Amino acid sequence: MDIWLFLLILAAILIGWLLGRWQPFKTSSRKPDSNLFTEKYARGLNYLLADDQDNAIKIFTDLIEVNKETIEIHISLGNLFRSKGEVDRAIKVHQNLLARPNLTRKQRHIAIAELASDYLKAGLLDRAEKLYREMIELNAEPKLAYRRLLDLYIAEKSWGQAVECAQVLFDMEEPGAGLVYSQCLCEIASDAIDSGNHRLAHKNLDRALEIDDQCVRASLLLIDLHIKTDNLAAAKDIFQRLVRQSPEYMGLYIEPAKKIYLRKQNKVYRKFLQNQHQLHPSTRLAMALLENYAQNDEIEKAREFLSDILHQSPSFEAFEFALRFLKSNPDQLGETWETLSRFLKVLQANKTEYACSLCGYESHAIQWLCPSCRNWGAMKPVKP
């Protein structure tokens, strides 16, 4: 029995209990109504037992008059409609409740929250936002309202409003709010860097690191910002701290390392790659080191290192590099090698490099907001 059927049966039982409790038809003048109520209730149960949920719901909905004793049942029926995907019917039930003048303050707040959930599921985001704002003004579960608004603004990529909600939740000491807060600040900073507003970017990144000093994304963006403004000393300081603090993201550090060291310090860059590959061996570090050897015409070093890689930790990237590297020797390559190289490139493009530690979602590129479970910072590098 699924949860939908179980809840519907429970609602039927509650309706029967309430009808028995009221007994509004004991007098002779109400006997026809009594028979009508009993007949409808029995028919509703028959529909339910026959697994005809649509007709059962219709009858039970018609049976229940909205009053202070049946409001909870109406809310439950509305929620059942929503859970079944019949959002329009859920909206009608909850709108009908809110139109009643006999609701208590608590009941009105519950009805507003449920109607907002209906709108959210229906994709009526403006209406949902308006109701969540109303909940905050009424002090009706404001933390829940801010959480829902935060999810809504993230979905709309309204980062300024998302930051406002995340900050409120952070101040309320909501678990996980700091992580979301810092990531939303990074979104604003990233857009600011792209538009050339370095001052705004710096302000948001500094705040992101105040909130979450372990935020890898904020540090990487700050490094990029310092490089763009020719402040290599500051970029280097943050880079070195980041390498010590979060070495598991080493694959993301190669590009900033190039920008920091390669201008005048090729030996320092190579030493960095060698040391990190020894400490945290990975395909990306190996490929970066091979490319560095090849670009500096150190062919023998490249051959030796490539041979070690292909024997110790073969990968699609290593084989693809080998084909390109050996292409200079026509005697060793032919059309087959070219075909194999293209094949390996396709496989490489589809290779999983990051996976969500919470839901398992896999991706070739880093995504700070998991597209599957919608958690920030949950994507982790996959070990080769």
Image: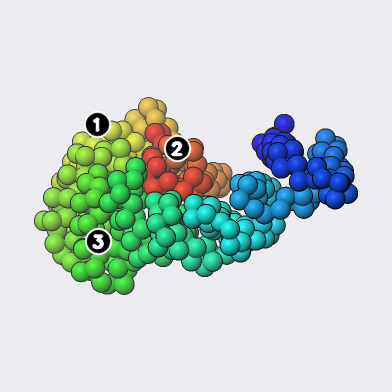
Relative to 141, say whether 194 is above or below.
below
Where does label 3 land, which residue?
Answer: 204
- Colour convention: rainbow
Q: Which of 191 and 89 is in front in this view?
A: 89
Residue 25 lies, in percent from the top left, at 80, 45
Tell me the residue at 27%/57% (across/down). 221
Residue 59 lies, in percent from the top left, at 80, 49
Q: Quadrant of the C terminus?
A: top left
Discs 1/2, front: 2
Tell me the residue at 38%/39% (across/down). 381
* Disc 2 residue type (three-letter): Leu
Work out how far the residue at label 3 is from the one at label 2, CA to CA, in angstroms.
27 Å
Q: Nearer the viewer, residue 241 or 10?
A: 10
Q: Report which quarter residue 287 is drawn in.
A: top left
Discs 3/1, front: 3
Where does label 1 land, which residue?
Answer: 279
Work out how far the residue at label 3 is from the one at label 1, CA to CA, in angstroms.
33 Å
Where does label 2 land, which residue?
Answer: 358
Q: Report which quarter residue 189 is drawn in.
A: bottom left
* Disc 1 residue type (three-letter): Leu
* Disc 3 residue type (three-letter): Asn
Mark 1 crowdedness (10 Å alpha carbons): few <14, some 14-19, many ≥20: few
Instruction: Kindly state the secondary structure of the residue where label 1 is placed.
Output: helix
- For the residues bearing labels 3 and 2, Cβ distance under 8 angstroms: no
Mark 2 crowdedness (10 Å alpha carbons): few <14, some 14-19, many ≥20: some
Residue 178 lies, in percent from the top left, at 30, 48
Q: Which of marks 1 and 2 is nearer the N terminus?
A: 1
